[in-house]
Image (cartoon, rainbow, N blue to C red):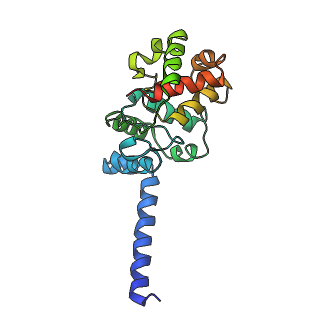
Amino acid sequence: MMTRSKRKRVWLVYALWLAACLLLSLPSFSRAAGDVAAKAAICTTCHGLGGNSTTGDYPSLAGQTSRYLYLQLRDFKAGRRSDPRMSPMVENLTPDDMHALADYFAAQKPIATDFKADPVKVEAGRKKSEEILCTMCHLGGFTGQNEIPRVAGQQYPYIVKQLQDFRDRKRTNDAGNMTSVSKNLTDADIQNLANYIANLQ
């Protein structure tokens, strides 16, 4: 059974934690304190340390183009892109917050995932990527540029889901480019492309 003094300490720790959470949710916090790392720390709860995701549920942000990250945050806030986990996280972000977070994660170093690609599917994915001219937008090595994302080394399940969502028009915040590219992809094509792209670093 906890003593009275121990209960007081537990409540104090809880109160401090709650206060910190409330402060971090205020849109003016990062501007007032000049501390983008504090807001970025909240992002890493899902997106991984330094923005390197360890799960296919969330994309890696490390090394992503700043322009792309900003546009995705803006689209989540405006409702042009929707996710039950992500959409609430952007509600209190200002344009300054979004730019600062985008710059922060763009400056982080991507770390290789532990995905074990199927060599046969990697080769099939490479051929399919050449056929549909992926590198015209994503560049060689799929490193991205400006508003075109870096997709090299993303988690395999995340790549599969995004390609499926573009193909099935569940995701449409790309001016129709990816919808057009992906509309004729089969499930096998998507798996092959994901093996190839996830295997790149």
Using the image as rendered, state which of residue 189 and residue 1 is in the foreground: 189
Q: Tell me where residue 19 appears, x and y as whole percent.
A: 43, 64
137 vs 58: above or below: above
Q: Quadrant of the C terminus?
A: top left
Q: Residue at x 47, y 43 (%)?
A: 93
Using the image as rendered, state which of residue 121 and residue 138 is in the foreground: 121
197 vs 73: above or below: above
Q: Tell me where residue 106 appears, x and y as whole percent.
A: 35, 33
Q: Tell me where residue 77 appears, x and y as whole percent.
A: 55, 38
User: In the figure, is residue 50 to the left or right of 178?
Assistant: left
Q: Residue at x 49, y 36 (%)?
A: 73
Residue 92 visible in image? yes
Q: Residue at x 60, y 41 (%)?
A: 83
User: In the figure, is residue 108 to the left or right of 157?
Assistant: left
Using the image as rendered, state which of residue 60 and residue 26 is in the foreground: 60
User: In the figure, is residue 147 to the left or right of 86?
Assistant: left
52 vs 199: above or below: below
Residue at the farthest front position: 120
Residue 173 visible in image? no
- Dividing the picture into quadrants, the one containing residue 138 is top left
